[in-house]
Structure formats: structure tokens, C-alpha cells
Amino acid sequence: MSDTSYSRVQKSFLKYQHVFVLIAPVLFVTSVYFAAPTPADAGLDYWLEFWWLLPVFMLGATIVNTVGISGSALFVPFLIFVFPLFAQPLTPQTIVKVGLISEAFGLSSSAVAFIQYGLVDRRLALSLVAGSVPFVVGGALLSFVIPEVLFHSLLGIALLAASYLLFTADLGHGDSDESSGSSSGTDPAAPAPDGGTAVDLPNDPGKLGPAGVRTDDDGTVTRVDREGDDYTYTRSGYLRRFGNYSIGGTFQGLAGFGVGELGIVSMLGTKVPVRVAIGTNHIVVALTAILASLVHVFGGGLVGGHSLSLATTPWNMVVFTVPATVVGGQIAPYVSNALETDTIKNFVGGLFAVISVALFLMAAGGVI
């Protein structure tokens, strides 16, 4: 396929990405209904038992995708504390599996939406995913053999750390220090005195709007999003990000979250602009969530732990949580532009702190 044809296909996909993305949960639900191993007496009551998870997970997916963190950071505590009030308690492995499967679809949906906006550094994202893979797999396999008390304790530590990182991270969409061009009142295409343009910015015909990316010989990246806002940064700081993503990847496999919370902070710490950091982080979290989901579904027998097969997956839950997170992922970029991210960030950080205390109390009760 020629570069021109590839560019045309890419542009068409991004232009109509919401159609393709929304078809995915329809195909998923259809395949689950007709092919998934379900109880022999599964009827309409079985499939509609957890319909109320649809609005809950849609709201949760919108919140976490707006901030750029892992969906399971909200889904797992919800399934531990709130879900048993309306249904039966779930095992830790099942909780993480439902959270990861739902998160994988939701973050993939949101990631495509952020790509459409031109806010994803794919080269940076793929390098981070590659470095996280062994830690995600190791954490997922570890989840099969650790005691429930230790599981709750580690969840509490992860959430407490995530709360601290969210409170200290600057996720506001400040324009003056991270982008120029139209975001700061300057038209990138405005004429300059020499007859050129005021700012020499890339313009890629394969992207929507005045969008593109250029990497100079010195490693400086200039990125333009679909609204015409431009961002300048470098990809330096790989070692620091690798350290954060290795720890976060272990928790991502173990509990279903962690790589997003540590990852967003590490990218901001290495001077990646906040909106690019949030968009890029979606790719990293989505791909690691998919990997962790596969290990959680098929990997129990590899370590002599609980063997979770497809038959043990609560399909009547995920047929509602998956579509909910996909829709929430599509909504998130618009919410991100409409609301102050700091408001959502502080709410989620406070919620994490409260949940972590409850998890520590649960762990203490299990020991006693």
C-alpha cells in the first residue's frame, strides 16, 4: 500500500472513528451471546441481571479517561465495596478480570478519540508499552497466588500512591507554558513580514484539520492538534519513565491499575505537555490492560494458582460494562476540553484516599 493510500485510509478511519469504535461493543456483545460459555439455564433474566452497571461504568469511564488514568482504579473498588450491596461478592481475581476487560475497551475507545485530536505521541507510547510488558505479565500472574488480605493491602497502597500523585500533579490545561499557536492567540498560518508564516508548523494531509508532527535533528518534537494548537517538547527522560512504568506495570497486572497513574506523572515530570501526556497515556494503559486481561483469563494454570477459564467470566456483567466504557471513552475528550481537569483530578484523588483507608481496614480485619 502506497503512502498516499495509507494516509487516505488513516484519515477516513479517524474521521469516522466513532462509528468503527461503537461497532466494536456490538460485535463483542453479539459474540458473547452466541459463543461464550454460559450456564445451561441462561435466559433473559441471566442476561439482564446487571443492566444497572451500564450507567455506573459509563460515568466511571468518562471520569478516568478525562484525567488519563486506569479505569480499574475506580471499577475495582466499586466491585469490592458497592457491587456486593446489590449482588453477590466477587473473588479478587474475578473483580480484576471484569475491571480489566471493561477498561481495555474503554481506554481503546478513548485512545482512538485522542489520536483523532492529534494528541498521541505513538513513538513514545510504543516504547513505554514495550518496557512495561514483562512487569504487567508478572503482576498478572502474581495475582493468582497472593492471599486476599495481601491483595487488599496492595490495592490500598496503590490507591494511596495514586491519590498523592494526582493531588501533586499539574493536570490543568494551561496553554501559556506548554503550547503556542492558536492556543495562545497566534494563528499558526498567519502571514509573517517575510511573506512566510508566523510559525513554521507541520501540516500532515493525512490528519484532520491543521494537524501534524515533526521531529527535528536535535530531537525536538513539534506537534499540532486538530484545533491548530501546537506543542513543543522532547522525548528525553526514557530512564525515569521506565522506572515509573515498571512499578506501575506490576500493579497494572496485579490489580488492574497503576501504570496510568504513575505514567501520567512521569511524563509530566519529563516535560511532555499535559494534553499530549494524557493522550499518549491512553495508548499505554489500553494496550497493557488488554495484555493483563489475556493473562488473567488464560494464565492461572501457568503458576499453579486459580485457573480462570472463559467459563468463569461473568458474561452477564461484561455485556453491559464493555459498551458503557466504550461510550464513556468517546465522551472523555469533549469533557476534557469543557471542564477544568483539576476539578475532576481532585475529586478522584480524594475518592482514592477514602477507598484506600477502607481497603486497609478490610485487610486488617482479614488478619485479625
Image: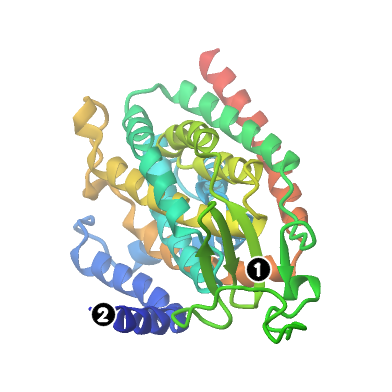
Q: Under tag 1, what secondary structure?
A: strand
Three-letter amino acid code of the residue under disc 1: Asp
Q: Is residue 361 above or below residue 170?
A: above
Give the label on residue 368, or none: none
Left or right, residue 39 beside residue 135: left
Q: What residue is rendered at 55% in x and 76% in y?
A: 211
Looking at the rendered image, the quarter that the C terminus falls into is top right
- Rendering coords of residue 20 (x, y %): 38, 78
In terms of depth relative to the viewer, which is nearer, 45 or 261?
261
- Rendering coords of residue 180 (x, y %): 73, 67
Left or right, residue 144 beside residue 154: left
Specify the quadrant of the image occupied by residue 122: bottom left
In terms of depth relative to the viewer, which is nearer, 235 or 153?
235
Q: Is residue 102 above or below residue 15?
A: above
Q: Under tag 2, what secondary structure?
A: loop
Residue 364 at least partly seen: yes
Which residue matches tag 1?
230
Specify the quadrant of the image occupied by residue 364: top right
Q: Give yes or no for contact between labels 2 and 1 (Cβ–Cβ under 8 Å).
A: no
Residue 52 at least partly seen: no
